Amino acid sequence: MIFCLIGILLYGFGTALYLTCYLGAGPRDGLMVGICQRFHLRINVVRTSLEISVCLLGFLLGGVVGLGTVLFATSIGGVVQFFLNIIARLPHIPYEK
């Protein structure tokens, strides 16, 4: 269980890092960012909703949903939001070409 929690923290941190680099988001994160911008919602609400929806769909299609899956789906939105807030407070170093 401790490895699951560490994994969720690292995954959330990594997601926040690459979202703040503006190098483009993956499919699920792109959907999350698009919904957030379009409807002016917080990332933690949208990401958690997406993850729970995907888990429910996977379960309905016959997949196994274990404790780690439920823990990830319900917490990753808040973890990403937490790390995005921390990264936003860091000083910005402009990129020079």
Image: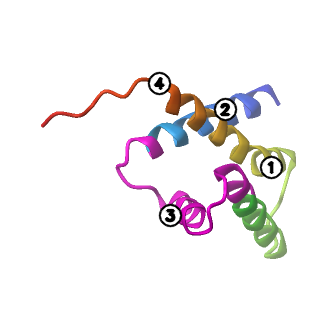
Q: Nearer the viewer, mark 2 or mark 4?
A: 4
User: In this image, 40 relative to 77: left or right?
Assistant: left
- Mark 3 lies on a secondary structure that is helix
Q: Quadrant of residue 8?
A: top right
Q: Which residues are magenta?
A: 19-48
The C terminus appears in which quarter of the rendering?
top left
The residue shown at (79%, 50%) is 69
Residue that numbered label 3 is attached to: 27
Rendered view: 78 above or below 62 = above
- Mark 2 lies on a secondary structure that is helix
User: Mark 1 and mark 3 in contact (Cβ < 8 Å)?
Assistant: no
Most frequent secondary structure within the magenta stretch: helix
Give the residue type at disc 4.
Leu
Residue that numbered label 2 is attached to: 9
User: In this image, 96 relative to 2: left or right?
Assistant: left
Separation of marks 1 and 2 at Cα, in angstroms: 13 Å
Give the residue type at disc 1.
Thr
| Residue 57 percent across, percent down from the top left | 77, 72
Lower position in the chain sequence, tag 2 or tag 4: 2
